[in-house]
Amino acid sequence: MNEQRIAVITDTGTDTPADFVAAHDVRVVPLRINYSDGSTYESGVDITPGELVARLADEVPSTSLPSPMRIQETFEAARRDGYVGAVFVAISSGLSATYETVGMVARQMEAEGFPVVVVDTRSIGVAAGLVVMEAVRQVEAGMPLSSLGSVLAAVSERTHVFFSVQNLDFLHKGGRITDAAWRLGSMLNIKPVFTCDASGKYVVAKKARGWKRALDEEVRLAVAAARGQERVRLAVCSYDDEATLDRLEERLRSEVGAVSEVVEVLRSGISADLLVHTGPSLAGVAVMGC
C-alpha cells in the first residue's frame, strides 16, 4: 500500500504491463504519433498498437514526446487525488527528450510545493517497465522520495534489454541504423541484436545470421547479464507472436535459472509509439538484477 502518497508516473515508452499499471495506480503519460496529414494521436489513448500496425503499409508516421502541458496536467491530477509528491520513470534520455522535458516541468512543480524525482532508465520498452515496477515496490515498502532517485538509478544500471527485428526497414527509416547496416543486413540476412549502452542509446550487442540465431543470441546475452546476480526478474516482449514468447520464456527460465534465481518472467506487448520505430516483427528480452 502506498501510505506515503507518492505517485509513480511513467510514459508509454516503458511498456509497463497494463495489469500492473491498473493495480498500482501508475499514471502513464502518452507519447505522440504524428501523420503527414497533420493528425496527431496519443499512444494508447486514441490509437492502439493494432491500429498503428494496420496503417504502416500506407505510412510510417513520426513520434514526438508528450507536451509539457500534458505532463503538468498529469502531475496536477495526482496532487488533486491526494498524492504529495511523485517519481517519474522515463524512457531513455538517449532516445527521447521526454526525460529533459519532464525535468523542466518537475522543477516548476517543486516550486509550487509538489516535489518530483525524475529517473532516466537509460533503457526502453519492458526493460524500462521493470524499473517502473521496482519504483512501485520501493514506494510501497516506504522508501522516502529523497532516496528514490539514487536507488532507481542503481536499479537502472542492473537492467538490460536485448531485442532484434526480422525487418530492419523501420529502424532504418527512423534513423536508428545506418544505410550501410541496413543494406548489409537485408542482403545477407544478418539480424543485429540491439541493446542500450550506458548513455541509453541503441548499440549492436551481437550480429546473427537469421532470425532463429538472433533469438539464440538474445538468450545468451540475458544469461551473461544475469550471471553474478543472486536473483533476477525477466521479461519477454513481442507485438503478437505468442509462440516466440513461449519459446523465449521457456529458455530463459531454464538457462538464466542455471546461473541466477528467477523471481518471475513477465510478458509485454509493444506500445504504438515504439512500433513506429521497430515495426511489428520485434522480439526481445529484459533482465533486471534484484
Image: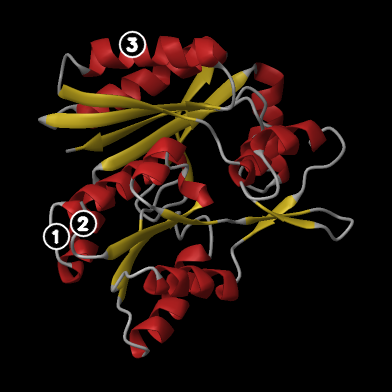
Q: Position of residue 277 (x, y in %)?
A: 64, 42
Residue wearing tag 1? 143
**Circle 2 is placed at which residue position?**
139
> Which amino acid type corresponds to the residue marked 1 in the rendered image?
Met
Name the spot of residue 188 as percent of width and height, x first.
66, 18
Whether 23 is drawn above or below 117: the answer is above
- Mark 3 vs mark 1, CA separation in Å: 34 Å
Cα distance in 3D space between marks 3 and 2: 32 Å
Q: Residues within 10 Å of mark 3 (few under 14, many from 20)?
A: some
Residue located beneath label 3 in the image: 251
Picture quadrant of residue 289 = top left
Please tell me in which quadrant of the rendered image residue 178 appears: top right
222 sits to left or right of 245: left
Q: Which residue is at the front of the view, 151 or 188?
A: 151
Q: Residue lying at the far left in this picture: please name it.
A: 230
Residue 85 relative to residue 100: left or right: left
